[in-house]
Amino acid sequence: MVPVSDLDRAKSFYADKVGFNVDHDTKISDENRVVQLTPPGSGCSIVVGKGIVPEMAPGSLKGLQLVVSDIHAAHDQLVERGVEVSDVQVADESGFRPSREGDALDNVGFVFFNDPDGNGWAVQQISARG
């Protein structure tokens, strides 16, 4: 569950800007609606909704994470789609720093973005899964 204040705005952001697939948009009643979205190629989905328990404050979810095989390609795609996304960052012993040419990015390359409500996402590069 990703807490949002405006379901239509959230659905548009995740589907049209971030590129998630809309699995279903189900209106149960005027007080209850569920929208399920899945990142391309993922076995995991998110749900935004109205009247769904548990209630969380919009924008209160931080640390959601996606994994991609090429962080630069993911960054470029998000920018092209109009998402305000950070430059590529590298996690090291001091936290995060801007990436530099030649950096090995597997496991440590990230970009960050927020949805319109402020829910925070990290996108991490992992080229191969073991």
Image (spheres, rainbow, N blue to C red):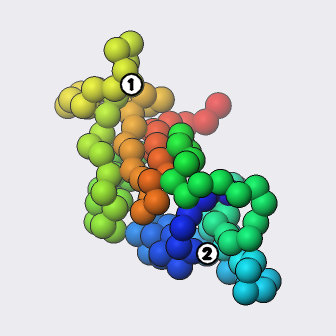
Q: CA distance from mark 1 to mark 2?
A: 32 Å
Q: Using the image as rendered, state which of residue 94 and residue 79 is in the foreground.
A: 94
Horizontally, residue 98 falls left or right of residue 108, namely left
Q: Is residue 99 above or below residue 76?
A: above
Horizontally, residue 2 falls left or right of residue 10, namely right
Place of residue 81 in the rendered image (x, y in percent of width and height, measured from the top left)? 33, 68
**Res 61 seen here:** yes
User: Which residue is found at the position 37% from the left and 43% from the top?
Assistant: 111
**Residue 37 occupies quadrant:** bottom right
Horizontally, residue 91 falls left or right of residue 62, namely left
Place of residue 13 in the rendered image (x, y in percent of width and height, measured from the top left)? 45, 70
Q: Using the image as rendered, state which of residue 95 and residue 124 is in the foreground.
A: 95
**Residue 92 occupies quadrant:** top left
Task: Judge the density around disc 1: few (<14), some (14-19), many (≥20) Cα neighbours within 10 Å.
Answer: some
User: Which residue is found at the position 34% from the left and 14% from the top?
Assistant: 94
Q: Which mark is residue 127?
A: none
Q: Is residue 126 above or below residue 119?
A: above
Quadrant where the C terminus is found in the figure: top right
**Res 69 seen here:** no
Horizontally, residue 3 falls left or right of residue 111, namely right
Helix, strand or loop for disc 1: strand
Counting residues from the N terminus, which is met first, the one under dot 1 or under dot 2?
Answer: 2
Q: Are marks 1 and 2 in contact (CB under 8 Å)?
A: no
User: Which residue is found at the position 28% from the left and 26% from the top?
Assistant: 97
Place of residue 52 in the rendered image (x, y in percent of width and height, measured from the top left)? 76, 66
Quadrant where the N terminus is found in the figure: bottom right
Q: Which mark is residue 91?
A: 1
Q: Which residue is mark 2?
A: 22
**Residue 18 occupies quadrant:** bottom left
Amino acid carrying mark 2 in the image: Val
Amino acid carrying mark 1 in the image: Ala
